[in-house]
Amino acid sequence: MDTFESKNARAWDKMVQGRAPLARPATDRDFANPLRTVDPLGWLGESIQGWRVLCLAAGGGRQSALYAAAGADVTVLDISREMLAQDAAVARERKLKLRIVEGTMTDLSMFAAGDFDLVLQPVSSCYVPDVVVVYRQVARLLQGGGLYVSQHKTPASLQVAAKPSSAGYVIDETYYRTAPLPPATEPSRLREVGATEYLHRWEQLIGGLCRAGFVVEDLIEPAHAEADAERGTFAHRAQYIAPYVRIKARRVGERGLIR
């Protein structure tokens, strides 16, 4: 049976094969200061040396390698074999140690409770129907006081057309929905062709975190707008709709020692 997970695995495999921008490994410039690259806001402090980090749905040879270069003990999990192959290749090239796991973010039963100090999840929750299922999995894996840093596509961005009409950027998808979004028809920084994507409401993205046992400590909308951007471009649309949100959440409970 063809599931949303198998469709998304194929979509990302194809993105790697097509060298899509979102599926490219970290560069030499990124490695010049790996901690600053992955944590420009300083949410993680001055050092993550020895932290047990899970890069969740974060294959591609970027996140995992940079966290490892910053001194963390890194596990990377992804549903795409091609993305994970890039993690393995970068690890070999940079002489980094990684634990690489093929799997889905909705089933993390291969890991024990409290296995990690930090779970890092780039934009990927849009590929599962129920984001709270993921939150509950992550809560089990984190030790008390551990951090969960995640990034998501904003609900409004998934509701609004990618290109403007004469009336501007128009809302053309409903907010209260359980069905997947209509498939993307062309590549962009907003949607992935061939992927099955879901819109999650704010009450699910933020309320779901709280109900899963997290306290939200910070939230930003990374700036992608450019004042002089050409009409219809990603940077122009971002003047009106924030495409992403980044959330820092802490697992409720007494914090153990970070090894």
Image: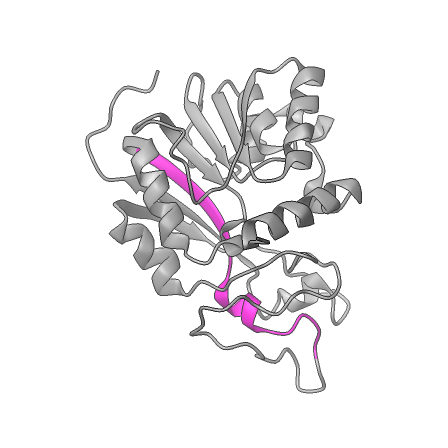
In this picture, which residue range is highlighted in magenta?
Answer: 146-164
Residue 258 visible in this rendered orientation of the protein: yes
Asked if residue 157 lies left or right of residue 211, the reply is right
Q: Is residue 73 above or below residue 181?
A: above
Residue drawn at x 57%, y 53% is 1
Asked if residue 118 lies left or right of residue 124, the reply is left
Asked if residue 16 lies left or right of residue 244, the reply is right
Q: Is residue 182 above or below residue 110?
A: below
Q: Quadrant of residue 85?
A: top right
Q: Quadrant of residue 59?
A: top right
Residue 137 percent location from the top left of the image: 35, 41
Residue 60 percent location from the top left of the image: 65, 35
Queried whether the magenta region covers residue 41, the answer comes back as: no
Residue 165 percent location from the top left of the image: 71, 82
Quadrant where the C terminus sits is top left
Asked if residue 218 lies left or right of residue 182, the reply is left
Q: Quadrant of residue 226?
A: bottom right
Residue furthest right as drawn: 18
Q: Is residue 99 above or below residue 152?
A: above
Residue 231 percent location from the top left of the image: 75, 72
